[in-house]
Image (cartoon, helix red, strand yellow):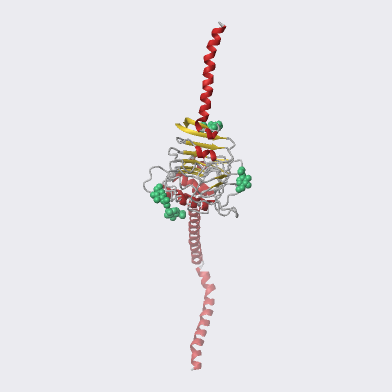
C-alpha cells in the first residue's frame, strides 16, 4: 500500500514541477531583459482579453525595460515606480507596437515628459498619467523649460486622456495656457474623454483651453476649485457631460447658465448635455433664485437635480428645488407694483382733498365773500395804481 501511495505521489510532484516551470516560463514571456520583474500575458483587462504587460510597484527608476516590450503588447501598465523624467522614445526607437492601445503610467512621480518621449503610439486609444508630479510650465523653473507643446502629438488616435492629480501642487494659474498649447500642438482631433480632476484648478486664464478638442464628449473637472464656468464650453459642439462635482460653486451666474444653454442649443445634438454640480457649497440665499428657475426650465440635464443642496450655514442644508423662493421672486416687478399702489393711493387722496375743499368753499361761501371782498378791493386798487404807474412811467422818459 505504501509503495502504491508513493507511486501516486510521484505524478503529482511531477505535475507541480511542470507547473512551476510553466510559471517561470510565464514570467519569462516578457523576455529575458525583464529578469522576471513584470508579468506579461493574455488576461482580462476592462472586460476584454488582451496581452498585458504589468510592471506595478517593481521599484524601477528608469524606463529602459519598456524598450523591450513584446511586440504583441496591447496594454502597458507601468505604475508605482519612481521615474522623474521620461526620456525620448520611451518605447524604443525601432519597435513597432501596432497593437498597443492602452498605456497606464500612473503614480510614477513623473515630473517631466520630453517632447519626443512617445513614438510608435499611433494606435494608443487611452493614455493614463494620473497621480504624477508633472510640470508643463514655461515659467515654473528658470533653469529649465518644461513646456513641450507637442508632447502628445504622436497619439494621433488618442480617445481618452487621464490627467487626474497629474500636475505638481504648485501648478500656476497659467496651467490653462500651457494645456491649451499642448492641445493645439498635439492635434488631438479624436479625443473624446478628458480627465483633469484633483488638480487644484481655480480658474482657467485661457478661456479657449478646450476649444481645440473638437471631438470632446466628456470633460471631467471634479475636485477642483472652480467658482464659475469662466472657460468656453460652447465651442465644444459635441460635449455630452461636464463634471463639476466637488468644486467651489456658491451660485450659478447668468453667464454660466447661458454657456450651458448655448452648448445645448447647438443644432444636430443627439443627446442632452448633462452637467453635474453635486457637492458644491451652494448658498441658500436669494442669489440662488436664477439657478433655481433655470434648473426647472432648462433642457440641460442637471444630474441628481432633485438632491442638489444648498447650505444655510455649515450644518444646515436644503434641497435647492424645494426651497421656498416666494420672497425672492422677481424683485424688480415687485418694486413696480409698490409704485403703482403708491400712485393710486395718492390720486385717491388728492380727489378726496379736492372734494372736501370744494364743499367747504361751497358751504361757507357767504362768510368767505365778506372776508374776501375788502381784500379783493384793496388788491384791485393796488393793481390799478400799479398799472397806471406802469403805463405812465415809460411816457416820462419819452
Ligand atoms: C498588475 O499587478 C499588480 C501587482 O502585481 C496587481 O495588483 C494588479 O491588479 C495588476 N493589474 C492588472 C490589470 O492585472
Ligand atoms: C514634485 O516635484 C517637485 C519639484 O518640481 C518636488 O519638490 C516634489 O518633491 C515632488 N513631489 C513628489 C511627490 O514627487
Ligand atoms: C491633425 O490631424 C488630422 C487628422 O487626424 C490631420 O488631417 C491634420 O493634418 C493634422 N494637423 C496637423 C497640424 O498635424
Ligand atoms: C466660445 O467660442 C465660440 C466658438 O469659437 C464663440 O462663438 C463664442 O463667442 C465663445 N463664447 C465665449 C463666451 O467666449
| 378 displayed left or right of 237 | right
Q: Residue at x 43, y 37 (%)?
A: 99
Q: From this viewpoint, which residue is outermost toward the bottom?
A: 398
Q: Residue at x 57, y 54 (%)?
A: 139
Q: Residue at x 37, y 48 (%)?
A: 267
In the image, is residue 331 above or below residue 365?
Answer: above
Query: Is residue 326 visible in the rendered structure shown here?
Result: yes
In the image, is residue 329 above or below residue 76?
Answer: below
Q: From this viewpoint, which residue is outermost toward the front?
A: 32
Q: Quadrant of the N terminus?
A: top right
Q: Residue at x 49, y 39 (%)?
A: 103
| 273 and 258: which is toward the camera | 273
Q: From this viewpoint, which residue is outermost toward the left?
A: 268
| 361 and 139: which is toward the camera | 139
| 147 and 329: which is toward the camera | 147
| 236 displayed left or right of 202 | left
| 253 and 27: which is toward the camera | 27
Q: Count of labels shown?
A: 0
Image x and y of residue 37, in percent: 56, 33
Image x and y of residue 215, in percent: 42, 46
Query: Is residue 46 visible in the rendered structure shown here?
Result: no
Image x and y of residue 68, in percent: 50, 37
Amino acid at each position: 500500500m505504501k509503495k502504491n501511495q508513493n507511486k501516486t505521489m510521484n505524478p503529482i510532484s511531477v505535475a507541480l514541477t511542470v507547473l512551476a516551470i510553466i510559471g517561470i516560463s510565464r514570467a519569462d514571456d516578457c523576455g529575458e531583459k525583464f529578469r522576471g520583474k513584470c508579468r506579461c500575458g493574455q488576461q482580462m483587462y476592462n472586460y476584454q482579453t488582451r496581452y498585458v504587460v504589468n510592471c506595478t510597484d517593481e521599484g524601477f527608476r528608469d524606463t529602459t525595460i519598456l524598450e523591450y516590450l513584446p511586440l504583441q503588447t496591447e496594454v502597458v501598465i507601468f505604475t508605482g515606480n519612481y521615474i522623474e523624467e521620461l526620456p525620448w522614445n520611451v518605447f524604443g526607437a525601432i519597435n513597432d507596437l501596432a497593437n498597443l492601445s492602452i498605456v497606464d503610467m500612473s503614480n510614477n512621480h513623473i515630473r517631466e515628459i520630453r517632447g519626443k518621449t512617445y513614438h510608435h503610439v499611433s494606435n494608443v486609444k487611452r493614455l493614463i498619467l494620473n497621480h504624477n508630479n508633472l510640470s508643463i510650465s514655461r515659467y515654473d523653473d528658470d533653469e529649465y523649460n518644461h513646456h513641450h507643446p507637442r508632447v502628445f502629438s504622436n497619439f494621433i488616435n488618442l480617445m481618452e486622456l487621464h490627467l487626474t492629480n497629474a500636475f505638481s501642487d504648485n501648478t500656476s494659474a497659467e496651467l490653462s495656457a500651457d494645456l491649451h498649447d499642448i492641445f493645439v500642438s498635439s492635434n488631438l482631433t479624436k479625443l473624446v474623454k478628458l480627465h483633469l480632476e484633483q488638480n487644484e484648478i481655480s480658474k482657467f486664464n485661457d478661456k479657449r483651453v478646450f476649444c481645440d478638442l473638437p471631438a470632446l464628449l466628456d470633460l471631467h473637472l471634479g475636485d477642483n476649485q472652480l467658482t464659475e464656468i469662466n472657460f468656453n464650453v460652447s465651442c465644444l459642439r459635441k460635449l455630452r457631460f461636464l463634471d463639476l462635482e466637488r468644486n467651489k460653486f456658491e451660485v450659478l451666474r447668468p453667464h454660466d447658465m447661458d454657456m450651458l444653454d448655448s452648448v445645448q442649443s447647438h443644432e444636430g445634438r443627439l443627446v442632452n448635455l448633462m452637467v453635474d454640480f453635486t457637492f458644491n457649497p451652494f448658498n441658500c440665499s436669494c442669489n440662488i433664485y436664477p439657478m433655481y428657475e433655470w434648473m426647472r426650465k432648462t433642457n440641460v440635464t442637471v444630474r441628481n437635480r432633485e438632491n442638489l443642496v444648498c447650505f444655510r450655514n455649515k450644518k444646515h442644508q436644503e434641497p435647492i428645488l424645494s426651497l421656498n423662493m416666494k420672497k425672492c421672486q422677481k424683485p424688480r416687478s415687485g418694486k413696480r407694483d409698490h409704485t403703482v399702489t403708491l400712485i393710486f393711493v395718492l390720486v385717491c387722496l388728492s380727489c378726496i382733498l379736492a372734494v372736501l375743499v370744494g364743499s367747504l368753499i361751497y358751504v361757507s361761501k357767504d362768510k368767505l365773500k365778506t372776508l374776501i371782498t375788502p381784500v379783493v378791493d384793496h388788491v384791485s386798487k393796488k393793481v390799478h395804481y400799479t398799472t397806471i404807474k406802469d403805463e405812465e412811467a415809460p411816457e416820462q422818459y419819452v
